Image (cartoon, rainbow, N blue to C red):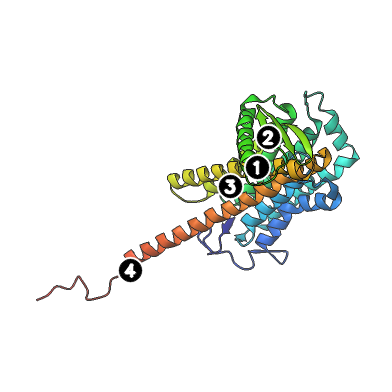
Amino acid sequence: MSFSDDKGASSSNRPASNQQSKIFGLNSSIAVTLLLTSPIIFSLAAYPDSFNLSWNQGRGGFLFAMAFIAAELLGLRYAIKHSRFYIVMALAGAAIGYFIALPLGLGDLIKNSHSEFHVLLVDSWTWMWDFIVMALFVGISLAVLFGKKWYKVAPAGPIYLGGSAVILSLDAFFPYDSLGPLQFIVPIYLQIDQAIIKFLALFMNLGSSTPATANGNILVLNGLHGPFALQVFWPSAGVHSMIIYSLVMLAFLLKMEMPLRRKLGFFAIGVIGTASVNVIRITLLSLYAILVTTDVNQWQAFHSVAGEIMFLPWLGIYLAIVMRLESKRIRKLRAHAASISSPSAGPDSSTKGP
């Protein structure tokens, strides 16, 4: 089997023919994308209420995984054997079967197994298995379709799903502040948040002369609607977004041809950007309690979606910028190489004079 990019360069150095690049009358990239996302589409249709955008309260992460899969696969041309496509169809059927079986008893079986494995947060434990199933399905399917070099084609989807499963497992087994190495960053973020809030208080009415006070992982806010105290743990501080960023960015850098120094530079810039997004998110959550409401349910509803709404668009935009910059750099290198290799104008230098 071979696969090719938009320019027709394939692993067999031959462009895919129109017949080979179509499956059931569809462009192969569309057919493969629909197949790999079919369990997500099914679960969205069957259980729409489960697609909460909060990372540990539902399947909202599936939507972003679907976006990653589509972004990497749509627009490419493939010469895919139908036999391999049929294998992936069977795998998709098995993944859909998992989601069908959940309300028929499988979900209760997973939930009730938490005591046997000494799980502390049951919800994270149950959502974790959804992401494990999808990560295995997408990863194995890509390996079937593209062989051992599948990670050069579309690694972001399975890595995002697998990374989400890992974070959910950490939250299930080590909730709150029980995982010290991940908790150490929380006081730093809260001190930065306190400084920003106090700076904003110089220019706007926040309802108090001391609108924010941070001590360890405790943040006390006092604004227009009265006091509001928070105990912050590592998932809420955006540590999970930094882990997801690292995994997805490494996947993209792995498939891109560029010098190691440039890869490290892009990765470091992304770390700074992700940390900045986390700071902005925590600041907005603080301002929401100070200026809008101290009602716990309303604040929690905003908190549950703020992270993904800010982080994942930032990640997508940053990856798009990196890919655009690298595409321009490669075009310039190719143009420069072509200008050097092209014959120069003027008389033949091999001709000798009299």
Residue plotted at (30% across, 70% down): 343
**Left-right relation of 353 to 339:** left
> Which of 307 and 68 lies nearest the eye of the viewer?
307
Asked if the residue under mark 1 is in contact with the one under mark 4, i.e. CB atoms within 8 Å, the reply is no
Name the residue type under label 3.
Answer: Tyr
Res 210 label:
2
Tell me how far mark 3 sits from mark 2, CA to CA: 51 Å
- Residue 210 at x, y percent in the picture: 68, 35
Tell me how far mark 1 sits from mark 3, CA to CA: 49 Å
Total numbered badges shown on the rendered structure: 4
Circle 2 Cα neighbour tier, 10 Å, few/some/many (<14 / 14–19 / ≥20): some
**Left-right relation of 347 to 331:** left
Which residue is identified by label 4? 342
Badge nearest the viewer, 4 or 1? 1
Tell me how far mark 4 sits from mark 1, CA to CA: 64 Å
Circle 3 Cα neighbour tier, 10 Å, few/some/many (<14 / 14–19 / ≥20): some
